[in-house]
Image: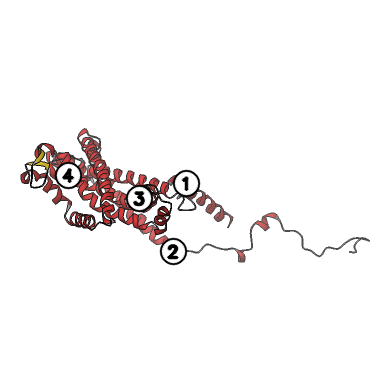
Amino acid sequence: MSEPPGGVVSLAPAPPDEDTAAKPPASQRVLPLRRPGRWMATAVVLVLVAQFVHGLVSNPFYQWDRFAYWFLRPTILDGLLITLEVTALSAVSGLLGGIVLALARLSKSPVLRAVSWTYVWALRSIPLIVVLIFLYNFSALYKTLSVGVPFGPAFFSFDESKLATDMVVAVVGLSLNEAAYAAEVVRGGILSVDQGQHEAAAALGLPKGHQFRRIVFPQALRSITPNYVNQLIGLVKSTSLVFYVSLLDLFGSAQTMGSTYPGDIVPLLLVVTVWYLILTSLVSVVQFYVERYYARGATRALPPTPLQKLRTGLADLRARARREAAV
């Protein structure tokens, strides 16, 4: 068949169909790498988790009805309130004491360094239960305490047994122990600040106290926060030892109820376990947002919040589903 006069014959191929252009040939498709080991490990873990949950739900020995009965009982809640009070007071006192001890360790005074090092060494070496019991029986060693001139007259004195209540003994014992560990956390955080920051602050002619409060310590908090929150989580669990100094905290209340109702020991232990899980989880959430706050200026982008991570994960799942459908 001849072309009409003046017509142009095109040798280019016809444009492909849109559906054909959207899907590359099978030989050119990039298929995801198969990972059978990962799938097998996931399946094994899911089976183990399912068996564990099934055991928790189906085993009558756990007595979940008694667990629900005891979980919000006034006795348990009163013990929980004491646990929170002891934890808060000990955490604040321990941190303040740790800051003082850390500054003493970094001081140029050999006496301050020696005393601080000895305190940290001794309190980290002695078990906490020993410290608490020793303080509980402190009145047997010193019936009265006085303030005055050493080997001289006393200005005033007071009865130690009246001052050292169960709450005071618990808070003082935990604070003394916590300060020893917090001192090393704070000292490590201060040492992590670049030496150039100290030199720049000194070059500006700022007073030592102002340098520490406004320049050094805020930067050190990025390192102090995660480490001290780990200590705080340990402190929450360590409050269970105050039961041995006659203070009925969360664990002590459950222990007392377990003695009265021996058939409910396991449900009471589960109640204590769940409450401690809740408390430590709340501390971890606070830790995340405190770390995120002090990360400003140190990173280019702030760490995503759990809600942002959830949104990103859902968006990735939708994108992956669309890619799988296209293949």
Mark 2–mark 1 contact, CB under 8 Å?
no
SS label for mark 2: helix
**Horizontal arrangement in the rendering, residue 87 relative to residue 207 (left or right):** left
Q: Secondary structure at mark 4?
A: helix
Q: Residue at x 23, y 58 (%)?
A: 110
Instruction: Please tell me the numbered disc located at residue 308.
Output: 1
Residue at 21% over, 33% down: 74
* Mark 2 lies on residue: 36
Q: For residue 208, which numbered disc appears in the image?
A: 3
Quadrant into which the C terminus falls:
bottom right
C-beta proximity under 8 Å, tags 3 and 1: no
Q: Earlier in the sequence, mark 2 or mark 3?
A: 2
- First in sequence: mark 2 or mark 4? 2
Inter-mark Cα distance, 3 to 1: 41 Å
Q: CA distance from mark 2 to mark 3?
A: 61 Å
Where does the image place residue 313, in percent across and percent down from the top left?
A: 48, 50
Disc 1 crowd rating (10 Å Cα; few below 14, some 14-19, many 20+) is few
* Local SS, label 1: helix
Label 4 is placed on what type of residue?
A: Val
Residue appearing at x 39%, y 47% in the figure: 214
The residue carrying pointer 2 sits among few (fewer than 14), some (14 to 19) or many (20 or more) residues within 10 Å by Cα, namely few
Percent x, y for residue 193? 38, 56
Given the image, on which type of amino acid does mark 2 rest?
Pro
Question: N-terminal of the two: label 1 or label 4?
Answer: 4
**Quadrant location, the N terminus:** bottom right
Label located before the other in sequence (3 or 4): 3
Disc assigned to residue 242 = 4
> Vertically, is 82 above or below 196?
above
Q: Say which amino acid is labelled 3.
A: Lys
Q: CA distance from mark 1 to mark 4?
A: 40 Å
